Image (tube, rainbow, N blue to C red):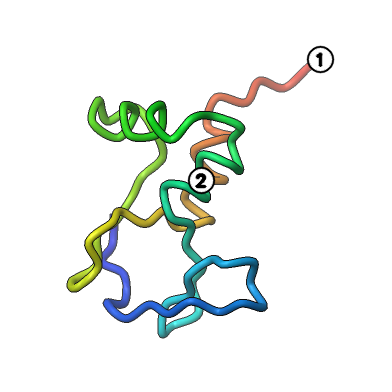
Amino acid sequence: MQAHATTTERRPEHDGQMRSADGRTFRTEAELARYLGRSLATVRKWRAQRIGPPFTKPKGVKQPLYLIADTEAWLFKGRVEAR
C-alpha cells in the first residue's frame, strides 16, 4: 500500500470523516464499524488478525484510519457475478 499524506483534518461537511491534504477521505475505526454495521470490537479484531480492510496510521495520528476507496475495494473483493 502506498504512503498517504501525513496531514489529516476533520471537516464537518464530510459527516465527520477525515480528509488528507491531497483530498483522500478516511474513516476512523468507529466510523468504519458504523458503516459496516459491525461492532468496534469486531473491526479491531479484524485489524489484529489482518483480515479486515487496509488501514494506515499517518505520522502524528494515534488511531488507525481507513481510506474509503480501500474499504470499498475490500468490500467488493469477494464479489461473485451472477450468470
- Closer to viewer: mark 2 or mark 1: 2
Image coordinates for residue 53, horizontal then vertical, percent: 41, 39
Image coordinates for residue 27, horizontal then vertical, percent: 48, 57
Please identify the residue farthest to the bottom as the structure is shown: 21
Badge 2 amino acid: Leu
In front: 39, or 78?
39
Q: Is residue 16 left or right of residue 48?
A: right
Residue at the spot of label 1 = 83
Disc 1, SS: loop
Residue at the spot of label 2 = 32
Label 2 CA crowd tier, 10 Å (few <14, some 14–19, many 20+)? many
Which corner quadrant holds the C terminus?
top right
Q: Is residue 39 left or right of residue 14?
A: left
Image coordinates for residue 10, horizontal then vertical, percent: 48, 76
Badge 1 amino acid: Arg
Q: For residue 8, what is the image quadrant?
A: bottom left
Q: Quick check: 16 above or below 83?
A: below
- In primary-sequence order, the first of circles 2 and 1 is 2
Query: In the rendered picture of this protein, how many numbered marks are placed on residues?
Result: 2
How far apart, in angstroms, are the residues tagged by discs 2 and 1? 31 Å
Label 1 CA crowd tier, 10 Å (few <14, some 14–19, many 20+)? few
Q: Quick check: 83 above or below 74?
A: above
Q: Is residue 30 left or right of residue 34?
A: left
Residue at 54%, 29% in the rendered image = 38
Disc 2, SS: helix
Please identify the residue farthest to the right as the structure is shown: 83
In front: 15, or 83?
15
Residue at 19%, 73% in the rendered image = 60
Residue at 56%, 35% in the rendered image = 75
In front: 58, or 16?
16
Q: Quick check: 70 above or below 42?
A: below
